[in-house]
Image (spheres, grey):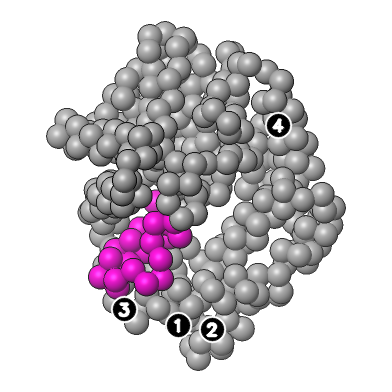
Amino acid sequence: MIYFENRHPSRGLDGYFECFAQDTIGLQRVVDAHIHEHFELLFCTSGCYELIVENHMMTLSKGDVVLIRPMQPHQTRTLQDGPNQYIVLRFVPDGLFSSTQPIYELKYIFPFLYSHKQNVEFYAADQLSASRIESLLIDILNECTQKTYGHEMAVRAYTEQVLLWFIRNWHMRSNTTPMDADHLEAIKAVFQYIEEHVDEPLTVAQIASSFSMGRSTFSRFFSQYVGESLPSYIRRLRLTRAANALIQTNKTITEIAAENGFASTSYFTMCFREQNSMTPKQFRSNANRHDRAAAEDDSFIGNPGETRYADRVI
C-alpha cells in the first residue's frame, strides 16, 4: 500500500523546504510506503532502520545517508528496540536554485538532480564525512527552528554544502562530465517544452524537429544528459502529474488520463500500476483513507500542524 504524502511545510525558503528530526522508540516501527514530489535526504543519527526505495532494500545505521528522488515509493522500519533517529531534509530544486543561478553552479547541480542513472543515492557511514554531514544538518535544523535574522541565507548555504558532498560522490560513481552552458540551456529548453505540451501526443521525432535536430541525434543527446530515454521521461512526468491530480482534485480517472496525455484510460491504468504497484483507483482510495486516519489516530507521527504520516507496529 502506497500513499501520497501531502504535507504543508514551513516556508524557510522559496518553494518547498523543511528539515526535522524523526525519533522512533521501539522495534518494528514502520513508516508506511509513500511518495511525494520533493527530494528527501535521510541521515541516520542513531539506531538502525530498514529502508525500501522502490525495489531496493538497504539498512541504515548511524552515519549512513540516502537521497530519495521525487515520486519514488519508500518506507522505513526500525530494526532495534532502542532510540532510533534520522534527520530528514526535504526540498524542491526551484526553492534553492533559480534560473538566474550562475552557470558554473547549475552545470554541476542540474545533472545531479535530474539524472536517473542512479535511482537511489546511498552512502555508508564514513566517520569524517558523517560528522560533517550531521553537523550541517543540525545547523539547518537550528536555523529553521530559531529563525534568527538571516536564517534563510544560512539554510541555503548549509544545504548547498550538503548537496555539494552528494554531487562530488555521485560524480565519482557515475563518471559524468559537467554540462557546458550550451548543453545546459538546451536541456532546460527541452524540459520546458515537454512541460508545456505534456497533455498532447508527443513523439521523439516531433520534439527533435522542434529543436532542429535529427531523431537519433536528439535521442542520444537526451539520454546522455538526463540518464533515461525521452519516452521514459515523458511517461514518468505524466504519471507524477496524474498522481498529484488523483490526490488534489475530484476529477475522474478518465479526465486525469486525458489531461496528462494518455491515449486511453486503460493504458493510463496499466502504466500507473506498473510504476506504483496499484491502480489509480486504489491509489486515490488509500490516500483518502490515510488522510482520515491521520486526523483521527494519535499514533500517527509528524511535525506539529502538518499532515502526518503513519507510524504503525507490525
Cα distance between the residues tagged 4 and 2: 43 Å
Q: Nearer the viewer, mark 2 or mark 3?
A: 3
Dot 3 amino acid type: Ala
**Magenta residues, start to end:** 93-118
Q: Relative to 78, is 269 above or below? A: below
Dot 1 amino acid type: Thr
The reply, left or right, for residue 273 in relation to residue 115 is right
Q: Nearer the viewer, mark 1 or mark 3?
A: 3
Tell me whether circle 2 and circle 1 mark residues in contact (CB < 8 Å). yes
Pointer 3: residues within 10 angstroms few (<14), some, or many (20+)? few
Dot 4 amino acid type: Asp
Q: Which of the pair 22/82 is nearer the observer?
A: 22
Asked if residue 98 is among those painted magenta in the image, a careful observer would answer yes
Mark positioned earlier in the residue sequence (2 or 1):
2
Quarter of image, res 254? bottom right
- Residue where numbered disc 3 is placed: 181
Callout 4 secondary element:
helix
- Residue where numbered disc 1 is placed: 217
Pointer 4: residues within 10 angstroms few (<14), some, or many (20+)? some
User: Could you say which disc has been placed on residue 291 in the image?
Assistant: 4
Mark positioned earlier in the residue sequence (1 or 4):
1
Callout 3 secondary element:
helix
Q: Relative to 290, is 255 above or below? A: below
Cα distance between the residues tagged 4 and 3: 44 Å
Residue at 31% over, 49% down: 150
